């Protein structure tokens, strides 16, 4: 557990080694105390076996962490910071007890002091001791519980880091800006090896492209000619990989060698997600695909469905306007101009645009925006789509490529919800999030719920067309996206992600950390930690919508809002009335 710390010493406790270890610790303490004015040694050891408190499966008696600290008030803040964080630890969903013992030897009771009290006082060297309950191993046998160890290691590391932070600010000349700056800055080779191997697996297939029908346009024509009575048959690209072989490569990656608990968890989540995506590609166009999609992207919860239905009911279903239409070639020209703008900001932005007849709508694939050759869109949607596809998806992709971790451009596990939520928010920030767009996102949620509950393609299409008042082609496009591959629930993440990002912003959340790469909401604290530790580089590219004065004003208004999607609707209405 201590090996994940920025500074540690593991030494034998046998009596014959004590003098040598003591001299080594004395020299370290003397050198660094002279540099910083004081020095802290935290000794960590496993508490003795025995009693139900050391059995994580017994909830009746909580395991106890014992902190040993000096009596002096000078160490009160440090000891209490450690105790406060330790109390947040959960072991198999159960809490823990924390006992703070003041006075006496702060080290393990079975070993002599590392430095004599008089010498420690001379060096202004202080001690804390932590006796860890042995809940991470089976009593009497020593067999370990690896998942408990993993969770405990991360929690204990954070607790100790906060104790270091309080000690540094209270007792030394060093004033760190945040407790995360006291974590590791150096990254061992095993981290880069695992990161590269995971990226190698991820880069061998394009998950979303493999699930995009290559005959979306021709299937629409057949569906229309048949009077919307027979479900279309979709065709897909042949798989460029053997999922079983790639899974074998995936699980040979030695993630257990990564000592840093924050990074190890990120890599494990990505490994699990890649395995599930490979299984879905293997099961494409089979009944199993839907259940795997539900596991990966989740189902539509009642609260999100209620919001979607409310949006469809309250927002007007406006007929197509007489706005100027852009075709694929014209929109491609706009995209290229936007790409050129970002390339002038940073040469790392090497995005491309391509018009193709074997994609549906717009799709971003590995730094390339692919546009369906039959695309038609109104002029009022151009700025919104540029912000969504280029300013968010492509910018975070190339910002991620600039980072030392390749996972940040390929995407941390579960990144889609936050990524799409941020992209839709960007549409609002540039003034292009229309009521028809919000209705479209709501309709996707309804369609996913219907499909998940067993509705057919035709039934879903008819509901979208007749009840939700979408045009036949729009109804087809929504249903096609949801039913592709055998039932893809991903389209529910757009509205869900928008709700999440609005709540984040309304609580004062900063958008800057979200630009580092592609991540989930749960990764934001870890990304901030890695930034504090100087493991991550500053982002080279900032989207236009983060610097445009009108966009900044809209963002500030959201910070004082309720975090509701209807805040955006009210803003749209106000803007239209002003116009």
Image (cartoon, rainbow, N blue to C red):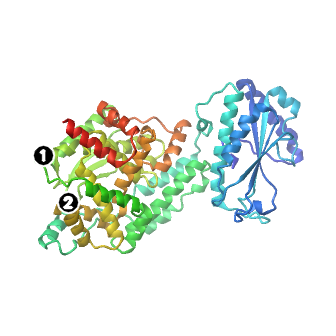
**Residue at (86%, 42%) from the top-left corner?**
18
Q: Pick the quarter of the image with the C terminus.
A: top left
Residue tagged 2: 474
Left or right: 354 as drawn, with respect to 413: left
Which residue in the protein does label 1 denote? 323
The location of residue 263, given as percent across then percent down, is 55, 49
Rendered location of residue 535, percent (x, y): 53, 39
Residue 42 point in image, percent of width and height: 75, 40
SS at badge 2: helix
Q: Does any portion of residue 516 appear in the rendered image? A: no
Dividing the picture into quadrants, the one containing residue 227 is bottom left
**Do we see residue 289 in this rendering?**
yes
Q: CA distance from mark 1 to mark 2?
A: 17 Å
Q: Is 170 on the left or on the right of 398, as rendered? A: right
Q: Is residue 287 above or below residue 98?
A: below
Element type where label 1 sits in the image:
loop
Task: Specify few, some or many for label 1: CA neighbours under 10 Å numbering under 14, 14-19, or 20 or more.
Answer: few
Q: Residue at x 35, y 56 (%)?
A: 307
Residue at image coords 70%, 46%: 2
Q: Position of residue 7 (x, y in %)?
A: 68, 39
**What residue is shown at x 18% (from left), y 45% (from top)?**
331
Residue 162, label in figure: none
In the image shown, does 148 or 572 lie closer to the viewer? 572
Q: Quadrant of residue 543?
A: top left
- Image mark count: 2
């Amino acid at each position: 557990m201590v090996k994940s710390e920025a500074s540690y010493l593991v030494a034998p406790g046998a009596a014959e080694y004590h003098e040598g270890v003591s001299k080594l610790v004395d020299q370290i303490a003397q050198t660094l105390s002279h540099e910083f004015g004081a020095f802290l040694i935290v000794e960590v050891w496993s508490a003795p076996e025995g009693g139900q408190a050391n059995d994580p499966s017994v909830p009746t008696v909580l395991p106890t962490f014992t902190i040993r600290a000096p009596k002096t008030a000078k160490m009160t803040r440090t000891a209490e910071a450690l105790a406060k964080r330790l109390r947040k630890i959960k072991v198999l969903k159960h809490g823990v007890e924390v006992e703070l013992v003041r006075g006496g030897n702060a080290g393990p009771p079975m070993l002599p002091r590392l430095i004599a009290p008089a010498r420690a006082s001379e060096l202004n060297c202080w001690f804390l001791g932590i006796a860890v309950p042995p809940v991470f191993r089976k009593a009497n046998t020593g067999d370990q519980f690896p998942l408990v160890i993993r969770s405990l290691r991360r929690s204990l590391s954070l607790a100790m880091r906060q104790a270091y932070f309080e000690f540094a600010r209270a007792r030394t000349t060093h004033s760190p800006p945040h407790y995360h700056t006291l974590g590791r800055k150096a990254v061992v080779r095993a981290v880069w090896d695992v990161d590269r191997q995971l990226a190698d697996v991820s880069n061998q297939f394009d998950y979303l492209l493999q699930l995009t029908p290559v005959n979306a346009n021709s299937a629409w024509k057949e569906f229309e000619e048949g009077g919307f009575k027979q479900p279309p048959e979709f065709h897909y690209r042949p798989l460029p990989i053997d999922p079983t072989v790639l899974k074998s490569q995936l699980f040979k990656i030695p993630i257990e060698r990564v000592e840093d608990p924050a990074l190890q968890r990120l890599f494990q989540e990505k490994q699990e997600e890649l395995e599930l995506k490979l299984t879905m590609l293997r099961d494409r166009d089979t009944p199993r695909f839907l259940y795997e999609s539900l596991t990966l992207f989740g189902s539509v919860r009642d609260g999100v469905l209620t919001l979607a239905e409310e949006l469809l009911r309250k927002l007007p279903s406006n007929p197509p306007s007489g706005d100027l239409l852009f075709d694929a070639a014209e929109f491609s020209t706009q995209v290229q101009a936007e790409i050129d703008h970002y390339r002038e900001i940073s040469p790392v932005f090497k995005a491309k645009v391509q018009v193709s007849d074997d994609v549906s709508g717009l799709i971003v694939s590995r730094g390339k925006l692919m546009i369906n050759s039959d695309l038609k869109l109104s002029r009022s949607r151009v700025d919104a789509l540029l912000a969504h596809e280029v300013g968010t998806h492509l910018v975070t992709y190339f910002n991620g490529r600039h980072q030392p971790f390749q996972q940040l451009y390929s995407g941390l596990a579960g990144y889609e919800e936050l990524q799409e939520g941020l992209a839709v928010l960007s549409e609002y920030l540039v003034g292009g999030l229309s009521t028809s767009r919000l209705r479209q996102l709501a309709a996707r949620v309804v369609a996913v719920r219907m499909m998940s509950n067993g509705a057919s393609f035709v039934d879903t299409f008819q509901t979208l067309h007749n009840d939700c008042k979408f045009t036949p082609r729009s109804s087809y496009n929504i249903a096609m996206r949801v039913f592709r591959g055998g039932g893809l629930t991903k389209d529910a993440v757009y509205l869900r992600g928008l709700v999440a990002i609005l709540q984040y912003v309304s609580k004062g959340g900063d958008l800057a950390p979200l630009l580092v790469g592609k991540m989930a909401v749960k990764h934001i604290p870890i990304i901030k930690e890695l930034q504090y530790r100087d493991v991550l580089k500053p982002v080279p590219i900032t989207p236009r919508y983060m610097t445009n004065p009108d966009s900044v004003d809209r963002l500030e208004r959201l910070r004082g809002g309720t975090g509701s999607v209807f805040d955006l609707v009210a803003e749209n209405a106000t803007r239209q009335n002003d116009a």
